[in-house]
Image (spheres, rainbow, N blue to C red):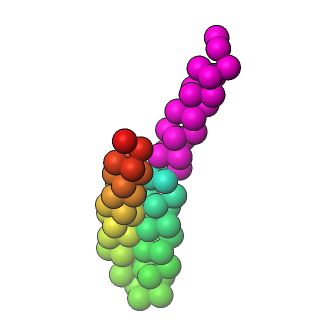
Amino acid sequence: MKQEDKRDLWRALGAFSNIGFTLASSVLVGLFLGRWIDNHFQTSPWASLTGIVIGLVAGFWSIYKQVTSMK
């Protein structure tokens, strides 16, 4: 395998791992923020569920922006 091919492979793996990290971290931030709100305002489980949904939307939006900028 050529050195340039190895470099391209590592770049692709880095991009894919970044996408996974982005989605997971967005959902976790939404979940923890929702749980914090639930504990303070006794709204369990609604703020947690809302935080997860907002985290998913934010994560997919961020992934969309990353993928479209790669072109």
Of residue 44 and residue 70, the one placed in the foreground of this image is 70
Decide: is 7 above or below 55.
above
| Residue 19 is a magenta residue | yes
Of residue 20 and residue 53, the one placed in the foreground of this image is 20
| Residue 44 is a magenta residue | no
Q: Residue 45 lies in what quarter of the image?
A: bottom left
Decide: is 30 above or below 67.
below
Left or right: 42, with 29 as reference point? left
Left or right: 7, with 63 as reference point? right
Instruction: Pinpoint residue 20: horizontal percent, then vertical percent.
Output: 49, 45
Determine the residue positioned at 34% across, 67% down: 54
Q: Can residue 33 be seen at all in this image of the molecule?
A: yes
Of residue 16 and residue 54, the one placed in the foreground of this image is 16
Instruction: Pinpoint residue 12: horizontal percent, then vertical percent.
Output: 52, 33
Determine the residue positioned at 57% across, 39% down: 14
Q: What residue occupies the far right of the structure in this picture?
A: 3
Q: Residue 37 lies in what quarter of the image?
A: bottom left
Left or right: 55, with 10 as reference point? left
Q: Can residue 63 be seen at all in this image of the molecule?
A: no
Determine the residue positioned at 41% across, 88% down: 41
Instruction: Pinpoint residue 2: horizontal percent, then vertical percent.
Output: 64, 14
Of residue 15 and residue 7, the one placed in the foreground of this image is 7
What is the magenta range?
1-21
Q: Main secondary structure of the magenta part?
A: helix
Instruction: Pinpoint residue 69: horizontal percent, then vertical percent.
Output: 39, 50
Q: What residue occupies the far top of the structure in this picture?
A: 1
Instruction: Classify the position of the C terminus by image quarter.
Output: top left
Instruction: Classify the position of the N terminus by image quarter.
Output: top right
Decide: is 1 above or below 5.
above
